[in-house]
Image (tube, rainbow, N blue to C red):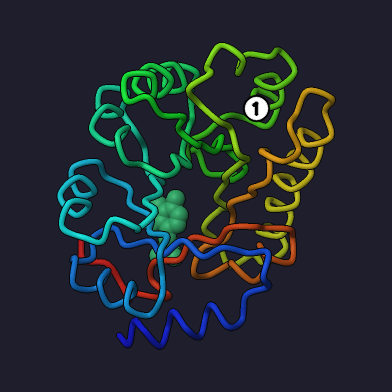
Amino acid sequence: MDIKRNIRAICSSLPESVKLVAVSKFHPVESIKEAYEAGQRIFGESRVQELTAKQPVLPEDIEWHFIGTLQTNKVRYIAPFISMIQSVDSIRLLQEINRRAGECNRIIHVLIEVHIAEEDSKHGFSPDECKSLFTQKTLRQFPGVRVCGLMGMATFTDDADRIRREFGILRNLFKEIKSMPDTDKDIFTELSMGMSDDYNTAIEEGSTMIRIGTGIFGTREY
Ligand SMILES: *Cc1c(COP(=O)(O)O)cnc(C)c1O
């Protein structure tokens, strides 16, 4: 894999409004350094243990995004340095992030993960549950958490129409929440959707943040 070339190719094709998260899970520190040398600064990881091993040995100006299932008992390990937790899928997790943010004197940026795929395996709030987080002002209880937008994953399928439809559901939800009177439009700005196989569709459907692993680093060895 020519990591630098992949990064440059993807970045040069992106609209200016779209950020690239390089998903480095299961890839070694050396691969992350290569991507960093090509100018990449935002990296996504999905396991706490792996992230806390990598973070101290890599440059400090990397913005780490957590994108995997996060157990509440592990939030404290990443709270001191994480730039964004994209995979918030429960109120309990919001509570814990809020608590740990307070301890670190930080405000932690998060995205609410929404379940848009037809598969049961994907995590996240249903669109209705997500909406009620905002309408019921639940989020006000968590001053240490800044909700910057939504994240979602489409069904793993070859059916391009279905993928587009699912991204459309997320975009409409994002717009609806953004237009609510209590939503701060300067903060609620990110719509994280699109991975290696579907990011072009995601961008057409309004993504502001794509998360690409395989397309940069090659296949993962689990
Ligand atoms: C692994 C992962 C990605 C990257 O997937 P690729 O298909 O390798 O680009 C993106 N988002 C999430 C939430 C992931 O877990």
Left or right: 195 with respect to 170?
A: left
Residue name at image x 36 percent, y 37 percent: 69
Residue name at image x 44 percent, y 39 percent: 85
Give percent across and percent down for residue 11.
Answer: 54, 77
Left or right: 22 with respect to 135?
A: left
Q: Quadrant location of ligand 1?
A: bottom left
Give percent across and percent down for residue 59.
Answer: 26, 61
Give percent across and percent down for residue 107.
Answer: 46, 29
Residue situated in front as seen by the camera: 154 or 141: 141
SS at mark 1?
Answer: helix
Give percent across and percent down for residue 156.
Answer: 51, 58
Q: Is residue 9 above or below residue 207?
A: below
Residue 131's image quarter?
Answer: top right
Establish whether ligand 1 lies closer than 8 Å to the Cβ of label 1: no
Q: Residues within 10 Å of mark 1 (few under 14, many from 20)?
A: many
Q: Which residue is mark 1?
A: 130
Residue name at image x 29 percent, y 34 percent: 80
Q: Is residue 206 above or below residue 46?
A: below
